[in-house]
């Protein structure tokens, strides 16, 4: 026991007032103890309900009230409280029964004051170890949070984890995370967990309470005791922690804790502020990632435009293919992530044409065998370019496999059927549809009816039948026309 700022709160209860006095006097000499004693057990019971108590020393038999009742009350309100019972009428049964119910020790009157002091000392040491253990468990929770944050992918799942950990630290209560788009903006609720007990609690969680409104650069805490008629008072702790990133406040973590009349310990406050800093870094990382993503997409777009600029006959092809492929992917039930990859893959699918000479790319006649060979290098070349950039990996299946054919006669790998990755099979169908309806060096674009007919004709040989069916269904429902990316041509355009 060291440091006198924190004193152990000891409660002595005995209906014989002289015992209260002797014990209190003996224990009060220690600077580590704050002793309160009652000879009226009813007053002691009331005291336990509203005050911090670390150790209870109580007589076992006191008129109508028993020491066991005192112990039950103490353990109900202070689960890690140390209870020592005293009795002048010891029986083995009594001793066993109270120890089973959670007493730490059992003293037989009369006892030496030294015996009492050493029992109290051991009890409080045991309690310190239990509290330390609890503290380690909390730290373990933080460690697990760090680990989980490392393996989570979405901002939402990461924030949920952080808020759940904050909730488990405060026990009963509610937690919210507010995030602002910029340092000048008022933070808005991102996650609220737990039921706020009243308007004041809900205001704090939503950032409308004065504590949360003040919380711009440092944490604020308010602890109030609320008296509820007919019930014991509860202590409400409300706290707001700023989410700081690069010296800017980007949001706040708010907590309301109630119905647990122990105050938040400095350790818990510390843990919550660590969680707030973790939440801030998760949000900041997510923003950086999103910026990076936008920069990548801009760079990809610039690359794709550079290729299209060389190939004057396929202008707009990449955009149209991306839009049409996304329509089909959405009908096939692809995930958000897969559709984001699809956009990148479709945009980049012909990137390998960067290595195809202009003369071949823009040749208005049908290609010779040699020229065709040079043209057919583009999927491999494109994939090779993308391999160097980690972030663009998901685009590779589109780039590499969009000229494979379902019957295994395509290039570059001559894969067949489902061995062709779905990305390649989807893009092959959409790419062909677009090629047929668009103008080419040697002909003008045909009608969509003509394209549909062509796809049906090569369904199962060149194309995956299921994907053709899906595109045809979308066309029949008028969804392709609704995309507004194709001019309507009722008749095949005359060849010039
Ligand atoms: Fe291609």
Image (cartoon, helix red, strand yellow):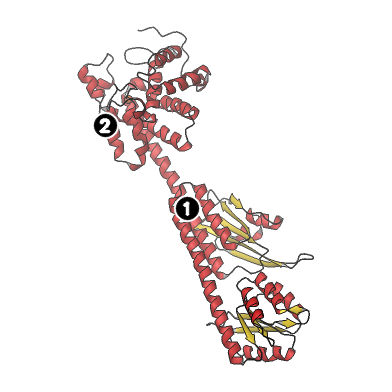
Residue at mark 2 to residue at mark 1: CA–CA distance: 37 Å
Q: Is residue 435 left or right of residue 135?
A: left
- Check the image and name the residue furthest to the left: 370
Viewer-side residue, 170 vs 314: 170
Which is nearer the N-term, disc 2 or disc 1? Answer: 1
Q: How many marks?
A: 2
Q: Which residue is mark 2?
A: 381
Give residue 157's mark: none
| Residue annotated with mark 1 | 282
Q: Residue at x 35, y 25 (%)?
A: 417
From the top left corner, tell me how far across and down residue 341 is, in percent.
Answer: 41, 35
Position in image of residue 473 (x %, y %): 50, 19
Classify the position of the C terminus by image quarter.
top left
Image check: 48 left or right of 331?
right
Position of 195 relative to 413 (above/below): below
Which percent across, then down, holds residue 374?
23, 24
Residue 178, above or below 271: above
Secondary structure category for the residue under label 2: helix
Which residue sits at x=49%, y=31%?
A: 333
Query: Disc 2, disc 1: CB below 8 Å?
Result: no
Q: Position of residue 221 (x, y in %)?
A: 61, 65
Q: Is residue 246 visible?
A: no
């Amino acid at each position: 026991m060291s440091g006198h700022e924190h004193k152990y709160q000891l409660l002595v209860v005995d209906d014989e007032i002289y015992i209260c006095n002797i014990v209190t006097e003996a224990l009060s000499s220690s600077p580590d103890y704050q002793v309160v004693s009652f000879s009226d057990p009813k007053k002691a019971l009331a005291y336990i309900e509203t005050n911090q108590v670390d150790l209870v020393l109580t007589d076992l038999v006191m008129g109508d009230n028993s020491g066991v009742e005192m112990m039950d009350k103490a353990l109900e309100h202070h689960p890690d409280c140390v209870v020592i019972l005293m009795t002048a009428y010891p029986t083995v049964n009594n001793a066993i029964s109270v120890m089973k119910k959670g007493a730490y020790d059992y003293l037989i009157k009369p006892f030496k004051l030294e015996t009492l002091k050493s029992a109290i000392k051991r009890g409080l040491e045991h309690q310190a170890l239990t509290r330390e253990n609890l503290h380690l468990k909390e730290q373990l929770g933080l460690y697990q949070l760090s680990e989980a944050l490392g393996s989570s992918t979405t901002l939402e799942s990461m924030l949920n984890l952080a808020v759940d950990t904050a909730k488990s630290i405060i026990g009963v209560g509610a937690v919210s995370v507010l995030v602002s788009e910029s340092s000048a903006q008022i933070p808005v609720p991102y996650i609220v967990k737990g039921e706020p007990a009243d308007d004041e609690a809900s205001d704090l969680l939503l950032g409308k309470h004065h504590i949360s409104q003040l919380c711009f650069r440092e944490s604020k805490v308010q602890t109030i005791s609320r008296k509820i008629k007919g019930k014991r008072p509860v202590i409400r702790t409300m706290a707001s922690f700023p989410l700081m990133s690069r010296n800017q406040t980007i949001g706040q973590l708010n907590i309301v804790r109630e119905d647990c009349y122990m105050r938040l310990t400095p350790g818990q406050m510390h843990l919550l502020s660590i969680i707030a800093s973790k939440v801030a870094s998760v949000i900041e990382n997510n923003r950086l990632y999103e910026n990076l993503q936008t920069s990548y997409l801009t760079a990809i777009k610039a690359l794709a435009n550079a290729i299209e600029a060389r190939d004057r006959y396929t202008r707009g092809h990449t955009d149209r293919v991306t839009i049409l492929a996304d329509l089909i992917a959405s009908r096939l039930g692809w995930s958000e992530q897969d559709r984001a990859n699809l956009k990148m893959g479709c945009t980049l699918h012909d990137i390998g044409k960067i290595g195809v000479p202009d003369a071949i790319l823009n040749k208005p006649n049908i290609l010779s065998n040699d020229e065709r060979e040079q043209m057919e290098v583009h999927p491999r070349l494109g994939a090779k370019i993308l391999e160097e950039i980690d972030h663009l990996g998901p685009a590779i299946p589109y780039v590499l496999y969009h000229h494979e054919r379902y019957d295994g006669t395509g290039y570059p790998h001559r894969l067949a059927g489902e061995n062709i990755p779905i990305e390649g099979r989807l893009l092959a169908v959409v790419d062909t549809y677009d090629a047929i309806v668009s103008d080419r060096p040697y002909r003008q674009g045909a009608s969509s009816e003509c394209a549909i007919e062509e796809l049906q004709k090569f369904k199962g040989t060149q194309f995956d039948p299921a994907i053709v069916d899906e595109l045809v269904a979308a066309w029949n429902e008028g969804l392709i026309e609704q995309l507004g990316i194709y001019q309507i041509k009722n008749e095949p355009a005359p060849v010039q």
